[in-house]
């Protein structure tokens, strides 16, 4: 298999909802006016209390720096695993549970924290730029590694990167975090970017105006959580919405899987997780991989979220609770 290090240098930020009106101009530009910005990697995920924005350096320039915006200190790089060939856009991608044992677990074992972003098209593994030598050293035996430069995939001379590099000591067993599962059903969809103007009014309403104060208050019990994710990455759109929100969009414009599968969420963490702890993604992805259960995985500034097929949610919760209780 091949591992591609993409060109994007990314920032992970959190925008408090109280400051949203100061950012609507920049966000509308990033979503709807692609010819007015050089941003190639943009993701916006809404939670009850905040928006997590993951975007490249060009996109970051569109955000005013205020007290409402928390910015993670690290620069992150996006990794993408493909099953064959040297092009991350022309090869069949591998689901997040399928890379749990080959990528996620080894990185966790060698003290490399990851930030996951699954989309309709593929799975992005974000690692700190400063951790790249450790990533290459850890994964070079399993993967052919390429680095994208000016749109071309260039093989990485792993020996020059890893020569003399000492692998970090294996970490102790990570904290097993509690999991919660709201009752919402979710859809994972895509959209032709050329049709964005057709749904602009609906999408702006969903992104900026739908979460009333009453709705936000109701979300806090996690019975039905407010969760919406929109990504525009290298010209490809991915949208995650609950089934009630999906009904607001014209069905003839949305692209879904052939099975039109519904998904349920597992939220990881009772308290904000932070970026320094390793093994959080592995805590979820490894048991799902062992059970051959598909999953989309979306990390946010404070919590992680896995979307699993609705018919598997009871088994997943039981399995993860047993793991939390130490019953392997």
Image (spheres, helix red, strand yellow):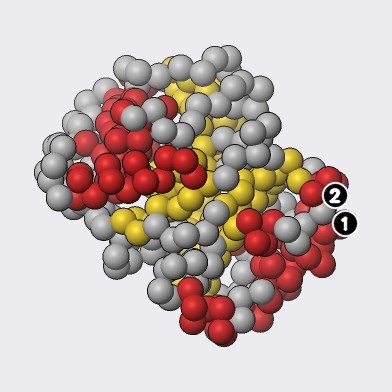
Distance between the Cα atoms at labels 1 and 2? 5 Å
Q: Tell me if 93 is positioned left or right of 195 in this view.
A: left
Residue 67 image offset from top left, x and y in percent: 49, 81
| Quadrant in which residue 54 is drawn | bottom right
The label on residue 17 is: none
Q: Which residue is mark 1?
A: 198
Residue 241 versus residue 63 in the image, above or below: above
Residue 173 image offset from top left, x and y in percent: 14, 44
Residue 235 versus residue 57 in the image, above or below: above
Whether tag 1 and tag 2 are in contact, CB under 8 A, the answer is yes
SS type, badge 2: helix
The residue sitting at 52% across, 51% down in the picture is 10
The residue sitting at 23% across, 42% down in the picture is 111
Q: Can you see residue 119?
A: yes
**In the orientation shown, which residue stands out farthest toward the right?**
198
Foreground of the two, 147 or 183: 183
**In the orientation shown, which residue stands out farthest toward the top?**
85
Residue 238 versus residue 98 in the image, above or below: below
- The crowding category of the residue bearing disc 1, from other C-alpha atoms within 10 Å (few below 14, some 14 to 19, many at least 20), is few
- The crowding category of the residue bearing disc 2, from other C-alpha atoms within 10 Å (few below 14, some 14 to 19, many at least 20), is few
Instruction: Locate the C terminus by quadrant.
Output: top left
Residue 81 image offset from top left, x and y in percent: 49, 27
Q: Tell me if 262 is positioned left or right of 317 in this view.
A: right
SS type, badge 1: helix
The residue sitting at 61% across, 76% down in the picture is 211
Q: Can you see residue 79?
A: no
Foreground of the two, 75 or 269: 269
Q: Tell me if 319 is positioned left or right of 80 in this view.
A: left
Q: Which residue is mark 2?
A: 195
The residue sitting at 49% across, 78% down in the picture is 218
């Amino acid at each position: 298999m091949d591992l591609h290090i993409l060109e994007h240098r990314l920032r992970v930020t959190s925008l408090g909802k109280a400051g949203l009106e100061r950012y609507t101009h920049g966000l509308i530009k990033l979503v709807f006016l692609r010819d007015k910005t050089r941003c190639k990697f943009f993701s916006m995920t809404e939670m009850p209390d905040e928006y997590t924005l993951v975007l490249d350096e060009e996109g970051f320039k569109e955000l005013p720096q205020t007290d409402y915006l928390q910015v993670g200190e690290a620069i992150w790089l996006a990794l993408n695993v493909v099953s064959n060939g040297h092009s991350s856009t022309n090869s069949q991608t591998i689901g997040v549970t399928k890379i749990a044992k080959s990528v996620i677990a080894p990185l966790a074992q060698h003290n490399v924290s990851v930030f996951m972003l699954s989309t309709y098209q593929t799975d992005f593994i974000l690692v700190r730029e400063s951790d790249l030598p450790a990533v290459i050293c850890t994964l070079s035996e399993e993967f052919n590694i390429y680095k994208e430069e000016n749109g071309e995939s260039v093989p990485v001379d792993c020996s020059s990167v890893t020569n003399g590099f000492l692998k970090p000591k294996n970490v102790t067993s990570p904290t097993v975090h509690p999991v919660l599962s709201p009752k919402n059903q979710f859809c994972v969809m895509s959209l032709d970017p050329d049709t964005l103007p057709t749904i602009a009014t609906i999408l702006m309403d969903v992104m900026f105006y739908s979460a009333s104060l009453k709705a936000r208050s109701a979300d806090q019990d996690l019975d039905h959580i407010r969760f919406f994710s929109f990504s525009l990455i290298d010209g490809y759109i991915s949208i995650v919405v609950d089934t009630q929100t999906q009904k607001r969009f014209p069905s003839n414009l949305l692209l879904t899987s052939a099975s039109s599968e519904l998904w349920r969420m597992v939220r990881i963490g009772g308290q904000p997780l932070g970026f320094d702890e390793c093994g959080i993604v592995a805590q979820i992805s490894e048991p799902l991989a062992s059970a051959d259960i598909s999953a989309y995985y979306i990390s946010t500034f404070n919590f992680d979220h896995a979307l699993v097929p609705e018919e598997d949610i009871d088994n997943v919760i039981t399995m993860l609770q047993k793991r939390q209780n130490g019953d392997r």
